[in-house]
Amino acid sequence: MTPQPSVILFLTDQQRWDTTGLHGNPLGLTPNLDRLAQRGTHFAHSFTCQPVCGPARSCLQTGQYATTTGVWRNGLPLPTDRPTLATCFNDAGYHTGYIGKWHLSGVEHAPGHGGAVPRDKRGGYTDWLACEALEFSVNEYHTVLYDDDNRPVRLPGYRVDALTDAGIRFIDRRKGGPFFLMMSYIEPHHQNDVDDYPPPESYRERYTGRWTPPDLQALGGSTAQHLGGYFGMVKRLDEAIGRLQDALISLGLDRDTIVLFTSDHGCHFKTRNDEYKRSCHESSIRVPTAAWGGPFDAGGRVNELVSLVDLPPTLLAACGLAPPQTMQGRSALPLLRGDASDWPDDVFVQVSEAETGRAVRTQRWKYAVTVPGSGWSNTTAGSDEYTEAFLYDLKHDPHELENLVSFPTHAKVRAVMRERLIRRMTEAGEPTPTIHEAPPTNHNWQRETPDGAENE
């Protein structure tokens, strides 16, 4: 009888998809991830369903959209009345552990105090070494987490290394039976109190001024100030992946352990609004995702669109466990076998903090709506009325530099995408909205829409 595989969920924070060699980054930041993804499965079109830390994490823990979990903005607690990854693995006889950033207790913490999490707000994990908000710990070389009894534990080294060391110790202790370990890093998220992306010593200089993604080249933002440090943090995360895999090999666990790598959302470096995320653009919502071990080995490149809500049922199914009916995502395992003919051809994104908006993305088109006047003081997750805000042709404008939402030539595309979005919203449990059309604008040139393009 084949033993149940152990599972490691390696979660980074605010990592763009194009930081990886898999997606064409030329700087060699992610050789370990690239190699392991090529051995296993690369989900080449992977998206968050909420580009905000807490809401995205609630989706990843429950397989539900943020409006269903109730964690539609930061500072709201994860409900205790529904299955999570931890409770599902606990019920299957796994030992579950959590290391790093939680951001789901509902308790906001001041800078300098990452924050202990009460036992009843830990999502069901049985082994705990974490804090509410690592971005509020003192700095990148001062990591304090809290153990099962909420005693502070100071971990030496750069923060990525500190968490990785703790993860390797957990794996070594639990090598006698199946485990589910979630390792939740803060990198490459900015350090809130100094508004910087602090890499390890000497890493910033390696990457400053060397290569800039095309959208950031065009739009600027804080790119020149921050990109070198951001890339340095990504490099250290990839080194952590290599160390983790080396530990599995050393302990004889590499053949019996599934590793899933992903991020909660991306980063647009203050180009789309006055902060770093919370927008419908690829820079905010597209994330790197790959898995290896178990059924993911030799899975190849998956080109279908995959959402964060699909990852929990995928992991459970990979271990032979039935995902609970409460999960709104679906297992992506059939995509590895090429027999998922009913897989959705779009993904749905909600934004409910800083603005209220919704978006739907197909392989070619992205369509987004917002609530005019919405902002940080939002008191509800959604609205009954929205106004069209964005339409991008990703085939001809992959960096989303030209908004077509007011082009009369694209009225038919907008109509089709509007219906797609309304269907997606209602399927996620939201009320059927009224979407007001964007007023047409006269343009000096006319682009013809290819026949059938609205269905791509």
Image: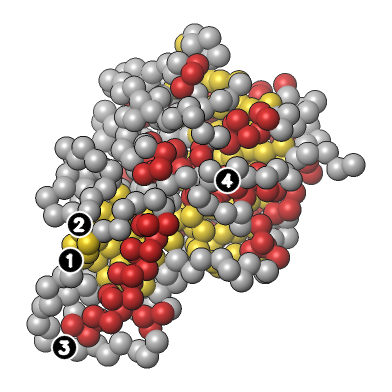
Q: Secondary structure at mark 3?
A: loop
**In terms of depth relative to the viewer, which is nearer, 382 or 453?**
382
Residue 129 vs residue 259: left or right? left
**In terms of depth relative to the viewer, which is nearer, 256 or 416?**
416
Decide: is 205 above or below 87: below
Q: Position of residue 157 (x, y in %)?
A: 50, 24
Among the two numbered marks 3 and 2 on one chain, the one whose residue lies closer to the N terminus: 2
Query: Do the CB atoms of the residues marked 3 and 4 lie less than 8 Å apart?
Result: no
Say what amino acid the circle numbered 4 marks.
Gln
In the picture, the disc for residue 325 is: 4
Say what amino acid the circle numbered 1 marks.
His
Residue depicted at x 51% and y 66%:
344
Residue 260 vs residue 389: left or right? right
Residue that label 1 marks: 436
Query: Do the CB atoms of the residues marked 1 and 3 lie less than 8 Å apart?
Result: no
Q: Position of residue 368 (x, y in %)?
A: 28, 63
In the picture, the disc for residue 385 is: 2
